[in-house]
Image (spheres, grey):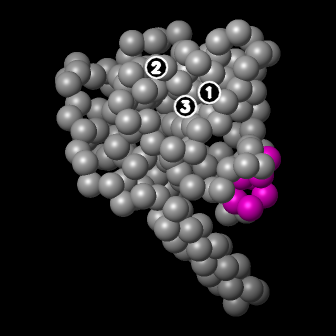
Amino acid sequence: MLVIIFFKQQKRRLLYLILIISFCLSCKNEKKEVLITNKSVSKISNDIPIYNFNELEPLLYTKTNKTYVINFWAMWCAPCVKELPYIQQYANKNPNVEIILVSLDFPEDIETKLKPFLKQKNITSKVILLDDPDSNSWIDKIDPNWSGAIPFTIIFNNKKRGFFEHTFSSLEDLENTITETLKL
């Protein structure tokens, strides 16, 4: 019985490794640094819930006209890290917009790596960790055109929805994309 449990754990670790490698290969290797100009930061959330895709999926839809920005990212993805300050700046300027950062990092890294990273980068938006190794299944459920590369952002309300598989280059770029996506 212990042997079966051991092999199941090894299989899960192998799936995570394959997922990380595929995401790393899909991320562009950009070296630009972004300076955060707004140093007034509210409290970093101590709660980072861990969801599987079935738990996350309801958050990807709304029946209201409220604007949602869902960003799939990871600490090891340079383009993801580059755009996080723009997303946080947007969240600070638009408290009526629901921002959810879906981390694809490892659950065991929440306390030792993810929370310190968020604190260092002054990221106070809501963070959820997606722990579902069947990425081939859930990526297609989110958007059949999504290659699986991150960063990946969904912008939506009850009338409009847009999918973006690229890095936002500035706050203005993000603002313009949100405005254009939700334009009636």
Task: Identify the residue at image location x=55%, y=21%.
Answer: 178
Task: Identify the residue at image location x=40%, y=49%.
Answer: 79
Which quarter of the picture shows residue 134? Answer: bottom right
Is label 1 or label 2 in front?
Answer: 2
Question: What's the mark number on residue 175?
Answer: 2
Closer-to-camera residue (126/90): 90
**Is disc 2 placed on a helix, strand or loop?**
helix
Residue 65 appears at what percent x and percent y? Answer: 70, 9
Q: Which amino acid does label 2 sit on?
A: Glu
Label 1, label 2: how many angstroms apart (C-alpha)? 11 Å
Main secondary structure along the magenta-highlighted residues: helix
Q: Looking at the image, is mark 1 or mark 2 earlier in the sequence? A: 1
Q: In this view, does 174 lie to the left or right of 164?
A: left
How many other residues sit within 10 Å of disc 1, few (<14), some (14-19) or many (≥20)?
Answer: many
Question: What's the mark number on residue 155?
Answer: 1
**Is disc 1 placed on a helix, strand or loop?**
strand
Q: Which amino acid does label 1 sit on?
A: Ile
Which quarter of the picture shows residue 9? Answer: bottom right
